[in-house]
Amino acid sequence: MKKIIIITFLLVFSHSFTYSQYMSVFGESETQWTVKSSNLHGITTDTLTAENDTIIDDVTYRIISSSDPHHTIYLHEDLEEGRWSYFTDAEPTERLLMDLSLNVGDTIYVEGAWLAEPGYYQVDSVYDKDERKHVQVNLPLHYADDEKLTFIEGVGPNTGLSYQEPTTGRMNPYLLCYWKDDIQEFFNIYYDGECSISSFSHIDEPDQPSISFNIIPNPVVQNYFELSFNKPFSGDIVLTDISGKVLFRKATTESLFKKTIYIPDFRQSGIFILRVRNKRGITLSQKMTIIRKH
């Protein structure tokens, strides 16, 4: 009798467990991408954030909000087949975002307003890097030192999440950085890991003073330090080590001239990078030294 119960339990358990062949691009609590693009006024960075799920025609999509209120992405992932597809408010036709099931020699249709010659492009390599599957397509990105279009497991394409749109003002799309559950898991190559790029003309920012800040004290020998800004600041504050690993991230919604930052309890001493990014996407960074007493 006991054997029958055990067998029945195992059968029920095996059917209730769903196996996923590929890694999801979504974290348990938070997922965010920053994507560079350009338009008539220059280069800008769009911050994409995963929100709630929604069901459309019996298909589950994750809503991806944007720093542009008129640009919302609806992303569907099939972790068994390794295919991601999406549509936007502006382009309701669903388009393939990436396909990790492709092999060398297979082709995929690539379009987009940034691409002079839309058409079928061939996969030229499939490889593992940092425990993630990469599918590389023989399509050089002319605006990023001919880095090739690449699908990255658990991250997305190196062109961002909506590069297939045929009509858009976002030209030359390029994924800058990606965070999952407060851990930065992707750094771009072409911009040396910078997570926000902008070059708006003076028409867009008339008489706007530049942001600057000081770290007091530096070196830091206590478990806290103070940031002093030249004008009221609100936005994100991120501390990384020199390899780019995020040690902590904080956000302030109040506009402050000064902000006290408490350092998490990690043990290493050394040189670190502190980055601040305001609500308009302007990013600055400074090196800082932390001395831990043992």
Image (cartoon, grey):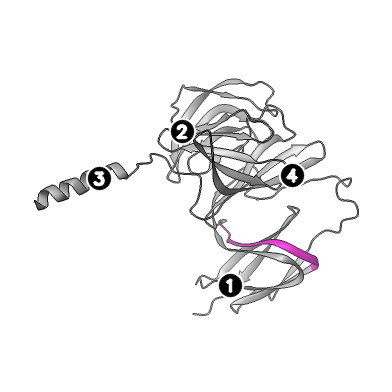
Q: Position of residue 55 (x, y in %)?
A: 53, 39
Disc 3: which residue: 12
SS state under label 4: strand
Residue sitting nearer the eye, 222 or 202? 202
Residue 127: name its quadrant: top left
Q: Which residue is mark 1?
A: 263
- Label 1: how many Cα within 10 Å (few below 14, some 14–19, many 20+): some
Q: Are marks 3 and 1 in contact (CB under 8 Å)?
A: no
The stretch of residues the image draws in magenta is 230-243
Amino acid on which the number 4 mark rests in the picture: Thr
Q: Residues within 10 Å of mark 2 (few under 14, many from 20)?
A: many
In contact (CB < 8 Å): disc 4 and disc 1: no
User: What crowding class fits label 3: few (fewer than 14 Cα within 10 Å), some (14-19), or many (20 or more)?
Assistant: few
Q: Kindly indicate whether the residue at mark 3 contacts the one at mark 2 (C-beta within 8 angstroms).
A: no
Residue 239: in magenta span: yes
Compared with 1, 265 (above or below) is below
* Earlier sequence position, callout 1 versus callout 2: 2
Q: Which mark, residue 100?
A: 2
